[in-house]
Amino acid sequence: MRHLTFATISISLLLCATMPAHAQEFCDEQTPVEQVTTDPCDEAVAQPTPAPAPDPLALRILRYAEVALKHRMSGLASYYSTSLDGTLTSTGEIFRNRRFTAAHLTLPLGTWVEIKARATGRIIRCRVNDRGPYVKKFAIDLSQAAARALGVDVAEDRHVDIRIIALPGEAPLPRAANETLASLR
């Protein structure tokens, strides 16, 4: 309502300013602008409210989900043999079976992942530092320590679910991020 009144007054003032002098006498008799009343609540409604700042943790999780869509994130897990201990990985570091590391064919090297074994329900975190496995039925290749911690070294069901918790150069998500992730699902 206020916008309509203001527009009407603006148009009438503009018309009065462009009229000849003898016609302006009619415009001078019009109601002055100061006498127009407006509702003070209209101004509060007219101003847009600023959008709330996005949660940076939620943005990170959404970015990781976007990356995960391009990669195989579940399947069977295999583990390195003892003979590979001390060899070089794709990142150039020396592989140690006692550390929690993994190999994935397509994830960026240096990515931190959280792996959950379906059979045992155990969850571990490890860093992808190598490429593999090269057998199509396997999704991830684990160090022996990681496979033992998950229980996939002795379990009949070696299916795992993989979730990205940090991309290269980032610190892994805090464990409390699981609640944030659950709220996004």
Image: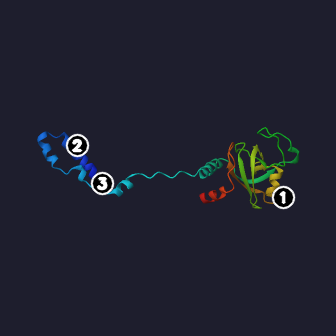
Residue sitting at x 36%, y 57%: 41
User: Which residue position is annotated with label 1?
Assistant: 154
User: Crowding at label 2, few (<14), some or many (≥20) Cα neighbours within 10 Å?
Assistant: few
x%, y% of residue 44? 38, 55
- Tell me the distance, in whole angstroms, between the alpha carbons under discs 2 and 3: 18 Å
Question: Could you tell which of marks 2 and 1 lies nearer the N-terminus?
Answer: 2
Callout 3: SS: helix
Give amino acid for label 3.
Answer: Arg
Residue sitting at x 63%, y 56%: 181
Q: Quadrant of the N terminus?
A: bottom left
User: Which residue position is annotated with label 2?
Assistant: 14
Can you name the residue that lies furthest to the left here? 22
Can you name the residue that lies furthest to the top here? 92
- Tell me the distance, in whole angstroms, between the alpha carbons under discs 1 and 3: 75 Å
The one nearer the camera, 1 or 98, is: 1
Give amino acid for label 2.
Answer: Leu
x%, y% of residue 172? 69, 49
Q: Are marks 2 and 3 in contact (CB under 8 Å)?
A: no
For residue 112, the mark is none
x%, y% of residue 105? 73, 44
- Tell me the distance, in whole angstroms, between the alpha carbons under discs 2 and 1: 87 Å
Residue sitting at x 20%, y 43%: 15
Question: Could you tell which of marks 2 and 3 lies nearer the N-terminus?
Answer: 3
Q: Quadrant of the C terminus?
A: bottom right
User: Which residue position is annotated with label 3?
Assistant: 2
User: Crowding at label 3, few (<14), some or many (≥20) Cα neighbours within 10 Å?
Assistant: some
Can you name the residue that lies furthest to the right here? 83
Callout 1: SS: loop
The one nearer the camera, 47 or 83, is: 47
The answer to which quarter of the image holds residue 74 is bottom right
Give amino acid for label 1.
Answer: Val
Callout 2: SS: helix
